[in-house]
Structures are given as C-alpha cells and as structure tokens.
Amino acid sequence: MQKLLKILVQKLPVDKNGDLIFDIDEAKDIHKNAVAMLCNAIGVDVLTTFADIEAIDISDKATTTSNDDLEKVERSLYNAFGTSQNIFNADGNLATSNSILNDEAMCRTLLLQFSAFYD
C-alpha cells in the first residue's frame, strides 16, 4: 500500500540570506490551493515546507523478486487472502497449469449435470 501512496512536497523558496520570501499567511494559502487542487486524487497528500527534505524508502526490497509495483501489490493481496496467485492463471508452473485444466474439466462435468437436471 505504501508504494501506491504519494506525498506531493512543495518547497517554498527562500532568498539568498535564507529569509522567507512568502509570509506565513501566503504560505497557508499556497498550501490550501494545492490541497484543493488534489482533493479528489486518491492516495495523494500535500506537504508544504520551507525546509530541505529528503525521501527515504523504507520498503523491504530483499523479500520481493519483482520490480513491478503492481505485481507486488497483487501478490500481497493474494497472500493476505490466503489464496494462490495462480488460481486462474498459471505463471509458468506446469503443476498449476495441469491443476487449472483439471478444475475446468470438473466444472464442465458439473455444468453438464446441472443442464441435464434442469432440462
């Protein structure tokens, strides 16, 4: 979830002496305007600052094998639900492909039984 959330940081300028160019009321208005523009954006927050900032990535890169963020999110969702990610689509594993074919065959037989019953 952390990979999907974004923080928009707007750094307000200072002059060559390090003094603020905008007063505090103007900075509040600039911040409010940015928040108003992004109020409908899902997963985006606004931070307004005069200070230098640095982004630190705290995600665990050692436990994931993929660089695709969406794939990481999908994998974590399937893990949270306790189901296989390959339940309907094989991802290269021959055993999973055969399992899917067996499941499809079972469902076809069941569908034919229901059809015969209702006819």
Image (cartoon, rainbow, N blue to C red):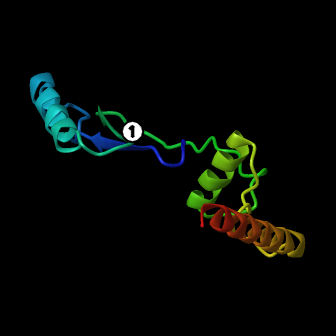
* Residue that extends furthest to the front in the rendered view of this protein: 119
Q: Residue at x 69, y 40 (%)?
A: 80
Q: The disc labelled 1 sits on which kind of residue?
A: Asp
- Front-lying residue, 46 or 96: 96
Q: Between residues 63 and 70, which one lies in front from this camera angle? A: 70
* SS for callout 1: loop
The residue drawn where x is 24% and y is 43% is 40
Closer to the camera, 3 or 91? 91
Q: Position of residue 79 (x, y in %)?
A: 72, 45
- The residue positioned 39% from the left and 39% from the top of the image is 52
Q: Which corner quadrant holds the N terminus?
A: top right
- Pick out the residue farthest to the top: 24
114 over 59 or under it: above or below:
below
Residue lying at the far right in this picture: please name it. 95
Is residue 112 shown above or below 64? below
Q: Residues within 10 Å of mark 1 (few under 14, many from 20)?
A: few
**Picture quadrant where residue 93 is located:** bottom right
Left or right of 96 on screen, residue 73: left
The answer to whether residue 42 is left or right of residue 114 is: left
Quarter of the image with the C terminus is bottom right
Q: Is residue 42 left or right of residue 65?
A: left
Q: Position of residue 118 (x, y in %)?
A: 60, 61
Q: Which residue is mark 1?
A: 52
Q: Is residue 25 left or right of residue 114?
A: left
**Whether residue 60 is situated above or below residue 17 in the rendered picture:** below
Q: Nearer the viewer, residue 75 or 100?
A: 100
Q: Residue at x 67, y 68 (%)?
A: 116
Where residue 49 appears, as percent x and y from the top left, is: 30, 33
Q: Position of residue 9 (x, y in %)?
A: 33, 42
